[in-house]
Amino acid sequence: LMSIQNNLAENINSILRAIIRLRGPKTIESVERRIRATLKIRNHPEILDEVRITRQVRGTFLMNNLKLIECADLLERGIIM
């Protein structure tokens, strides 16, 4: 039973890692907030039309926190510049 639980947990963890990059200090609350935000955006992409990033985001921050496909989509929509 324990090995089945471990295998399921590993699969769930790998799915989460593929969806969202968990970087920086980790607490249960911060990870939960990040996962909830990611799922909201994925389930309701129209939210992005209302969100605008006012600062110029440069350097490795963008690459560390967004995947290339997401970055291209945000650039195309004019959400980031």
Image (cartoon, helix red, strand yellow):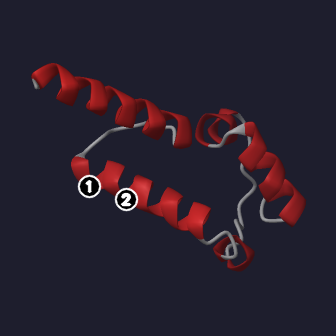
Q: Quadrant of the N terminus?
A: top left
The spot of residue 7 in percent (x, y) is: 28, 24
| Residue beneath the point at 78% across and 65% down | 79
Label 2 near label 1: C-beta < 8 Å?
yes
- Mark 1: amino acid: Glu
| Residue beneath the point at 37% across and 59% down | 33
The spot of residue 69 in percent (x, y) is: 77, 43
Q: Which mark is residue 77?
A: none
Residue closer to the observer: 10 or 2:
2
Instruction: Report the side of 19 relative to 59 (left or right).
Output: left
- 30 relative to 5, above or below: below
| Residue beneath the point at 11% across and 23% down | 2
The spot of residue 6 in percent (x, y) is: 22, 25
Q: Disc 1 versus disc 2: distance between alpha carbons?
A: 6 Å
Is residue 81 something that shows in the picture? no
Q: Which mark is residue 29?
A: 1
